[in-house]
Image (cartoon, rainbow, N blue to C red):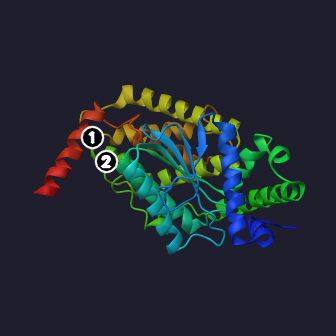
Amino acid sequence: MERDFRYLREKYGDHGARDIFEKICIQLFQKKFENAYAVQASPGDDGIDVLVGDLDKHMIVYQCKYFIDGIGATQKSQIKESYKTVTEKYKVAEWYLCVPILFTVENHKWWSNWKTEKQQDDNLKVELMDGSRLLMILQECDMYDRVFDEDLRLALKEIKNYLKEENARIYNEIIYDINDFSDISYKDCIFVKMLESANIFDIDDYKNDFFNAEIAKQKILSKGQTKEEIAYNQLQKKLRSVWKTQYNMYKHPTDGNELANNTYLRIEDLDTTTLKSSNDISLLAKKGMRHQLAEDKKLGWVDGYIQKLELYMEAEKDDGNG
């Protein structure tokens, strides 16, 4: 029988389902982190369900939302409000949204745009933990038998298997074509400014690559498998090494087009050898991972790229005020 987290609502009602979903999250993060604390649900919980660290320091926040019927305008508004509430009152290093469902293609488009904007504006990490990822990590932590009653334990195992299959189907539906994602601008992202500060302005393909990399990253994270996350991070290091070699050969004081193009070609050459990876990471995603690194200011396209980026953004700011 195919099940998802609606099973909790059918068995325990809306209120009970929310409580059990939050319990799943709390137990999971307290298993993973010694200094993880649950925050009692109340009008004054300030948008925090689980915190890791101390309130007066840069903490990690997990917000649990039992949005079992999908992500529409109302749910997006609640997500934004929860994020705004906690980030305006506290020092937050990382903010995670925990939901029991899988995002649709349209949800991923919205999330990618909003997440990137918030990370840029607030200089913190924003991530999604969907139902599939939560259950995968729960299983890795061997928590089914210890935490849940037998009927719920068996149901969660069924839900995990169903969501795993559904997750693969949703990602396979995504068509990697920038024309289908024209509503994602990324215009204020660091990686776009990094390109523009290197006099690279024909960047639609680069935006497409970045989106592919973001989707590949989320697909890997949703599996909740540490080995795949480590492999992804190792691939990033290899890609930065590829860029570094090209940077030393082709860096230019003002024009980054040759460096960007040659890095592109080198990644194509190494795709099935040095840069060989899981099927979840396409060639386009590997190219897009360059821009994830640029978003973190770990690479650029001209000599002295950090300084050039700062000067470019300052000039933009002055033009906007003029």
Residue 318 sits above or below residue 70 on the image = above
Q: Quadrant of the N terminus?
A: bottom right
Q: Are marks 2 and 1 in contact (CB under 8 Å)?
A: yes
Task: State the residue in front, 39 or 26.
Answer: 39
Q: Residue at x 70, y 35 (%)?
A: 227
Locate residue 184 relative to residue 4 in the image: left or right: left
Kind of residue indicated by mark 2: Lys
Query: Amino acid under label 1?
Result: Leu
Which mark is on residue 272?
none
Q: Which mark is residue 193?
A: 2
- Is there any visible trace of residue 307 in the rendered image? yes
Mark pair 2, 1: CA separation? 7 Å
List x then y, in percent, for residue 303.
Answer: 29, 31
Residue furthest to the left: 322
Look at the image and tell me in which quarter the C terminus lies.
Answer: bottom left
Query: What secondary structure is found at the residue carrying circle 1?
Result: helix
- The residue identified by callout 1 is 309
Pinpoint residue 112: horizontal percent, then vertical percent: 49, 57
Which mark sits nearer the N-terminus, 2 or 1?
Answer: 2
The location of residue 17, given as percent across then percent down, is 72, 65
For label 1, the crowd category at 10 Å Cα-Cα, with few meaning under 14, some 14 to 19 and many 20 or more, is many
Q: Residue sitting at 64 percent across and 56 percent down?
A: 130
Reply above or below: 18 against 52. Answer: below
**Residue 133 in view of the camera:** no
